[in-house]
Amino acid sequence: MRMTPEDKKWQSTIKAYVTNRDDQVAPAGHFNAGQKLFYWVMFWGALVLLITGVAMWFPEVVSGRMHLHWLMPLLVFLHVVAALATIGAFMIHVYMGVFLVSGGLHGILWGRVPVSWAKTHHRLWYEKMMKEDRASIRDGD
């Protein structure tokens, strides 16, 4: 999920991606930059929610014993920010996967996409798979 130079190119064509002008979108690998960004928002958001949530379960430890009265409001703020970020990212992810990217719902439901879809939306990954001559890739899928 590391960002690559190809991801930077893909990000520069995000407007074409959102408006479904697939021929103008820079080629992407197995995951495009948006999917990688979603991963990191969910990863860090979940981590912050876990840490702040556990700390808020034990306010007497955080505020009382450690004499860090200023910490609890900060934990609550970070918890809310992480919750809003993950909820917002999830809503955008579902909307894009179901409605915005044509053919995306097929991949969600069946775990497979047609070769033409993979070639259009994840060209670099498609080309890599074709070079590896994967038996699971067939023109009819």
Image (cartoon, rainbow, N blue to C red):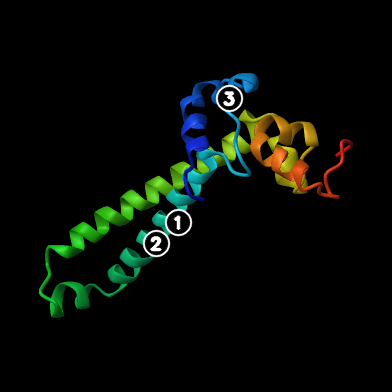
Checking the image for residue 79, the label placed there is none
Is residue 94 visible in the rendered structure shown here? yes
Q: Quickly name the residue at label 2.
A: 47
Which numbered disc, 1 or 3, marks the residue that appears first in the sequence?
3
Front-most of 131 and 26? Answer: 131
Front-most of 18 and 60? Answer: 18
Q: Are marks 1 and 2 in contact (CB under 8 Å)?
A: yes
Spatial separation of the CA atoms under disc 2 and disc 3: 32 Å
Q: Quadrant of the C terminus?
A: top right
The residue lying furthest to the front in this view is 131
In the rendered image, which quarter is residue 93 located in?
Answer: top right
Q: Is residue 56 above or below residue 136?
A: below
Identify the amino acid type marked 2: Leu
Residue located at (35% from left, 60% from top): 48
Q: How many marks?
A: 3
Disc 3 crowd rating (10 Å Cα; few below 14, some 14-19, many 20+) is many
The residue lying furthest to the right in this view is 140
Checking the image for residue 25, the label placed there is 3
Checking the image for residue 43, the label placed there is 1
Disc 1 crowd rating (10 Å Cα; few below 14, some 14-19, many 20+) is few
